[in-house]
Amino acid sequence: IYPMSSRMSENQPGSVISINGAGASTIATDLPRKSSSAESPPELRILCFDLTFYNRTTQFLLSCAGVFILYILYGYLQELIFTVEGFKPYGWFLTLVQFGYYIGFGLVERRLESYRASGTSFWNIEPAPRCIPMKTYLVLAALTLGTMGLSNSSLGYLNYPTQVIFKCCKLIPVLVGSILIQGKRYGPLDFAAAGCMCIGLAWFTLADSQMTPNFNLLGVAMISGALLCDAAIGNVQEKAMREHKAPSSEVVFYSYGLGFVYLFVIMLVTGNFFSGFAFCLEHPKETFGYGFLFSLSGYLGIQFVLALVRSSGAPIAATVTTARKAVTIAFSFLLFSKPFTVQYLWSGLVVVLGIYLNVYSKKNKLTFADIRQRLKKASTKLARSPSRKFLIEV
């Protein structure tokens, strides 16, 4: 969703949801467990708000409204920050600020979870012990830093719609990564979806290079690197979550906390911290102020996406987040002046077709063996038809 980006395996306990729609990051969580009785529905919470006893339609509408409002706000603020004159070189400092805010949000969420579990004083409560080993978090933090840092910095070189289109095509590195890391197998629909995304992405990038005077291949390299890191995060998280059953708040807190330390040390060594901090002090409202709202909307957006997945399932959540990205792109063209060509529309539709095929493949499992069997049956029927027999005799 960006803090986190949307991918999940089958609806099995312990599946991982990686949300990638707002910025460039990921999150893992367990799917809801089945209720112990028919009268007790599975728990559905968004931070302090309990939606468990609302009907399915209300849960869906509330989750959709939260996803659209928060992520449209997230995208608007992200693009608005980069319109500040002279800010484009400081994408990494924005990432440092965002990580700092996420640490605070994650700490508050962990305390809220412990408070709900124990009922003692909020300030005296101790967060739950860590579930995932620290060495795993060291890897996740580095990947999270690469995902969000490269994604934020790419806006200094790319149109915001181009960045969003790249994020829509996360399936491509996820598919390759899960084959290499976890040895998973995919069907023809998944490969067809990846092919459509590749074609649409290349077409959209070509149109952007022709229409945007400040187009830079460095931005393409940055957002591609962010997607590769994001794909690796999803697979590493999935493996860790299945083994250790950690809550999403723990993953957020440790991933962003260690990522903050990594980036802070790197920026101190390179000297970029002081220049970025000095620039932000000159524009506190546009950087720290908008940065807070930008981070808060992204963090809350994650909670709504997770609620949508729990209440309605991953395919519907993927459809909603895809529609949200389309609306975000439309708002970007309306609110920020930028050139437009009809090639943006056609290439975007090809990418949407790829996303549809990916969602469809989750409901309808089609393997290469099924295709071979159907072709064999079709050829057998064709060979037995009278017209075919006549042609063979001739």
Image (tube, rainbow, N blue to C red):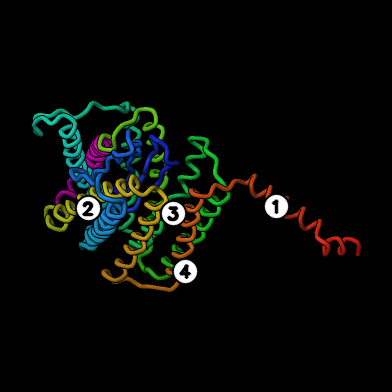
Specify the segment rendered in magenta: 251-278
Q: Is residue 358 left or right of residue 298?
A: right
Q: Which is more N-terminal, label 1 or label 2?
A: 2
Q: Which residue is mark 2?
A: 297
Front position in the image: 83 or 372: 372
Q: Which residue is mark 3?
A: 169
For the point 32% across and 28% down, which residue is it? 132
Helix, strand or loop under label 2: helix
Q: Residue 136: horizontal and vertical position, in percent?
A: 35, 30
Mark before the other along the chain sequence, 3 or 4: 3
User: Which amino acid does the dot numbered 4 rest on?
Assistant: Trp
Question: Callout 2, which amino acid?
Answer: Ser
Q: Earlier in the sequence, mark 3 or mark 1?
A: 3
* Label annotation for residue 346: 4
Q: Is residue 270 magenta?
A: yes
Closest to the camera, between mark 3 and mark 1, is 1
Q: Quadrant of the C terminus?
A: bottom right
